[in-house]
Amino acid sequence: MLDTIKNLFGFGPKVDYAELVKQGAIILDVRSKGEYAGGHIKGSINISVDTLANNLSKLKDKNQPIITCCASGMRSASAKSILSSKGYTQVYNGGSWGGLQYKL
């Protein structure tokens, strides 16, 4: 159970985020539009976590890697859970967008 919790919040096995991006991963920023406007990772897509379920058409390929991020990692963990439950096969919680930016 502890491993499940660690994986949910992005503390599971180490992920090479830069390599995922090289392979075509989408960076999905799930903060509000206002937060996103205040700063974000270049090339990321902004869909707030509270509207994600209604905007899945913007994420067409369920097998394309998706890296979720937000302000602290909590909303990105929720987004990862939503996407996984909808059949997306390669979803990674990148945690905070600021922290993820340094891993790319």
Image (cartoon, grey):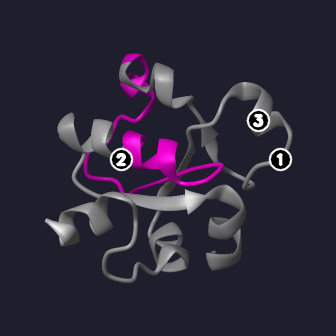
Q: Nearer the viewer, residue 49 or 59?
A: 49
Q: Residues within 10 Å of mark 1 (few under 14, many from 20)?
A: few
Where 98 falls versus 56 (above or below)?
below
Mark 3 or mark 2, which has the lower sequence index? 3
The residue at the far right in this view is 38
Q: Residues within 10 Å of mark 3 (few under 14, many from 20)?
A: some
The residue at the far left in this view is 1
Residue 9 - label:
none
Q: Is residue 88 magenta?
A: no
Q: Position of residue 84 (x, y in %)?
A: 23, 44
Q: CA distance from mark 1 to mark 3?
A: 7 Å
Q: Position of residue 56 (x, y in %)?
A: 37, 26
Q: Position of residue 17 (x, y in %)?
A: 50, 74
What residue did someone put label 3 on? 35
What SS does tag 1 mark?
Answer: loop
Image quarter in which the C terminus is found: bottom right
Q: Residue at x 76, y 35 (%)?
A: 35
Q: Amino acid at mark 1?
A: Gly
Residue 23 occupies quadrant: bottom left
Q: Is residue 55 magenta?
A: yes
Image quarter in which the N terminus is found: bottom left
Residue 80 - label:
2
What residue did someone put label 1 on? 39
Where 76 falls versus 95 (above or below)?
above
Q: Which residues are magenta?
A: 54-79
- Please indicate whether residue 41 sits to the left or right of residue 78 in the image: right
- Please indicate whether residue 72 sits to the left or right of residue 6 in the image: right
Q: Residue at x 61, y 53 (%)?
A: 72
Q: Residues within 10 Å of mark 2 (few under 14, many from 20)?
A: many
Q: CA distance from mark 2 to mark 1?
A: 21 Å
The residue at the far top in this view is 54
Q: Amino acid at mark 2?
A: Lys
